[in-house]
Image (spheres, rainbow, N blue to C red):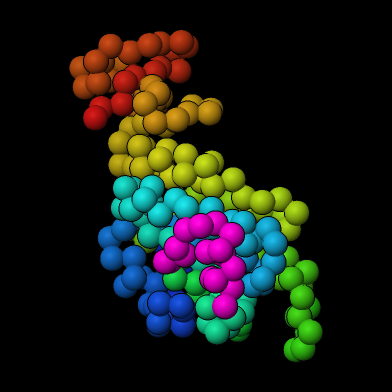
Amino acid sequence: MSIRINDIAPDFTAQSTAGQIKFHDWLDGSYAIIFSHPRDFTPVCTTEFGAVAQLAAEWKKRNTKVIGVSVDSVEDHGKWKRDIEAFSGAAADFPIIDDTSLTVAKAYDMLPAEYYLPQEGRTPANTATVRTVYIIGPDKKVRLTMTYPMSVGRNFAEILRALDAVQATDGVPFATPANWVPGQDVIVALSVSTEDATAKFGALDIKLPYLRFAKRPV
């Protein structure tokens, strides 16, 4: 069954580079980003883990925990972290889940409808679609998903921007327009009348009857 927006993110218990993690307990009221990979010691994934490590201060600023998933062992993860840190020049302090059993990959529907996983000699190609990003809210609900092919490195600047947009519209009657970045105007939800929106948010920039921009309250 596919994981949909606003589903409760599947809970799991797994070993990681930070010890055993019970995912829902680990969230502990924070936002979270799960980013998954088909194997350790792969070139594109090494650059991606490095990018996540370099953004440590940005995740913290946004009350967001990051957790990596790879279908190899904790022992291999520990060795791979040294490569990640040497490449990126940043400490990879976030946990990396041991998903040799593919428990998390299956729970989060990261594998194709039909797949074959050999008992020995498994290659990244066998788990190629395990390259997904999930943004999870403090309420444990899935807020956003992105899935990438093996050949395309993820743009973590876009993932950070998407996280900002999720947080900017969380629990308030706003949406963000195309290419929105923090500091720009937001769109007033259609469920709010122009009169009420003006009273609550100040003067609106009305482009069309259904497209009304407002300054995002600080």
Residue 20 seen: yes
Residue 98 seen: no
Figure quadrant of residue 71: bottom right
At a point 30% along the width and 42% down the height, the residue shown is 171
At a point 52% along the width and 64% down the height, the residue shown is 85
Considering the whole magenta stretch, tell me its main secondary structure. helix
Q: Residue furthest left?
A: 199
Q: Is residue 45 placed above or below 191 in the rendered structure? A: below
Region rendered in magenta: 79-94
> Quadrant of the image for the C terminus?
top left
Q: Position of residue 154 (x, y in %)?
A: 62, 50
Q: Position of residue 101 (x, y in %)?
A: 60, 84
Q: Position of residue 124 (x, y in %)?
A: 74, 71
> Quadrant of the image for the N terminus?
bottom right
On the rendered structure, is 22 left or right of 15?
Answer: left
Q: Position of residue 152 (x, y in %)?
A: 71, 50
